[in-house]
Image (spheres, coloured by chain):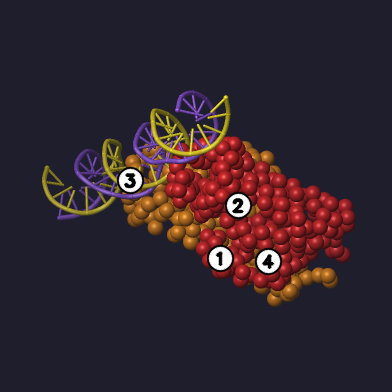
Chain colours: A red, B orange, C purple, D yellow
Amino acid sequence: MPRQTFFNLPEEKRKMIIDTALDEFGSRPYSKASLSRIVARAGIAKGSMYQYFEDKKDLFIYLLELAAGEKLAYIQQEIDPNADFFTACEQTILAGTRFGLNNPKLWQVMANAKDTTGEELLHEFIVKGKKMSRDYFSRMIRKGQEQGSIRRDVDTRLAAYMVSAMLSQGLMDYIMDLFGVGTLDELLARPELGQKLTEKEVRKMSSELTKLLRNGLGEMSS
Amino acid sequence: MPRQTFFNLPEEKRKMIIDTALDEFGSRPYSKASLSRIVARAGIAKGSMYQYFEDKKDLFIYLLELAAGEKLAYIQQEIDPNADFFTACEQTILAGTRFGLNNPKLWQVMANAKDTTGEELLHEFIVKGKKMSRDYFSRMIRKGQEQGSIRRDVDTRLAAYMVSAMLSQGLMDYIMDLFGVGTLDELLARPELGQKLTEKEVRKMSSELTKLLRNGLGEMSS
DNA sequence: AAGTCATGTGACCCCACAGTCACATTATAG
DNA sequence: CTATAATGTGACTGTGGGGTCACATGACTT
């Protein structure tokens, strides 16, 4: 956890530090991201950074929590809690995509939180995050089964893993391909691209993907 | 590419070096993996390593090509080229899983080739690899559509991304969960686990997953 | 004004790493 | 047996990293 000092900072400065750190951790894998570079770019002293955060890991985890929190809040505000499974899925995809396009830096940092092997605590934190997202899908699937929109014979656990993989990894790769870029950095470097995907296209994609999901999970006459 | 010197080595020594390197790159993200550690463990001089490989990247790419080549060969030998899409899928999943369980080190190295942001050439290499696997699925899907086993209205590209995500990321996470481990390292550390998944269970999983895929992609009376 | 506490600072320490090079060792050939 | 080419070697270099600390600067109190 960041130290109190960090929260005492004037908001502007705090935001600036966060922003600089997001850039760094978004454009390099954790082990290559450099605190020295962050402080240099942010124009503050290294020692100051260590008054705000315990260490590199502390900063990184703070950023991840920030990103995850904002994304979750955004998505939750966009979906109808009473909708059936597939509607909720479509809304989740839609909201998730929009959030990513509107917050490329946050998106990038979360996307970069994949490797981290060998950093015990960090790895645990990330595994836990993935698990939370999977559990969320598990619950939704089970609810769908109870409501009759999902076949009862699908293996909930397996399905949760697949939905999770599709909506994180698969969807991101697909979107990056739509933009014709190989990395999120390139997307970030050209902000005009964010507008290239029209609302209509995003909707189309979400509905296509949902269709794919439905016919894999939906109750049907075999 | 490795230098000729490397291929002149007695096979035993060559294998030993490869093995040691696989361990290192399998247990740490690329940027944290250390040549110094590899040579120490392998009991050879650092200078020697640089007679075999141009640099760190060269070695890593060699390992990736090796792993990908072996995996591909194994899978191709296991699948029936004339089978329909879903049968081929099931066979691919089955063969891929078996290969992974029997070659945990290779599996691990490939799984670790995810981050690499910021290492231009390396990143390109990996993106190209992912693309190859996606193209393979694309072709299979299109063939399935021509043969009538896959609905014509599915978006081939989107579907290819999803299948790809499911069979790499999703499947791996699922299997790791079955073993109750958070990292592949742990799996490797306890080789007895490799046997815990019985052939029967692997078959069951492959067929379940295929069922999931089919009902998402299969021609049906909607 | 004096004193006290919170915050800022950057030179510095230690360390690990990729990559090099002058030299030692071993094979090959004539 | 000698000469030449191929291979092995590990101390060394340069670089850049995370993290620390003795001190400077500012803010706030009495």
- Asked if residue B217 shows in the view, the reply is no
- Locate the C terminus of chain B by quadrant: bottom right
Label placed on residue B48:
3
Asked if labels 3 and 4 touch by Cβ distance under 8 angstroms, the answer is: no
Asked if labels 1 and 2 touch by Cβ distance under 8 angstroms, the answer is: no
Check disc 1 and report its element: helix, strand or loop: helix
Specify the quadrant of the image occupied by residue D12: top left
From the viewer's perspective, is the residue at label 4 or at label 3 nearer? 4
Front-most of residues A153 and B149: A153
Label 4 vs label 1: CA separation? 27 Å
Q: Which residue is mark 2?
A: A110
Asked if labels 3 and 1 touch by Cβ distance under 8 angstroms, the answer is: no
The lab-note entry on whether marks 2 and 1 share a chain reads yes
**Which amino acid type corresponds to the residue marked 1 in the rendered image?**
Pro
Q: Which residue is mark 1?
A: A191
**Which amino acid type corresponds to the residue marked 3 in the rendered image?**
Ser
Q: Chain of mark 1?
A: A
Is B214 on the left or on the right of B66, as rendered?
right
Which percent across, then down, holds residue B58?
41, 54
Label 4 vs label 2: CA separation? 24 Å
Asked if labels 1 and 4 touch by Cβ distance under 8 angstroms, the answer is: no
From the viewer's perspective, is the residue at label 4 or at label 1 nearer? 1
**Which amino acid type corresponds to the residue marked 4 in the rendered image?**
Ala
From the viewer's perspective, is the residue at label 4 or at label 2 nearer? 2
**Which amino acid type corresponds to the residue marked 2 in the rendered image?**
Met
Q: Which residue is mark 4?
A: B159
Specify the quadrant of the image occupied by residue B62: bottom left
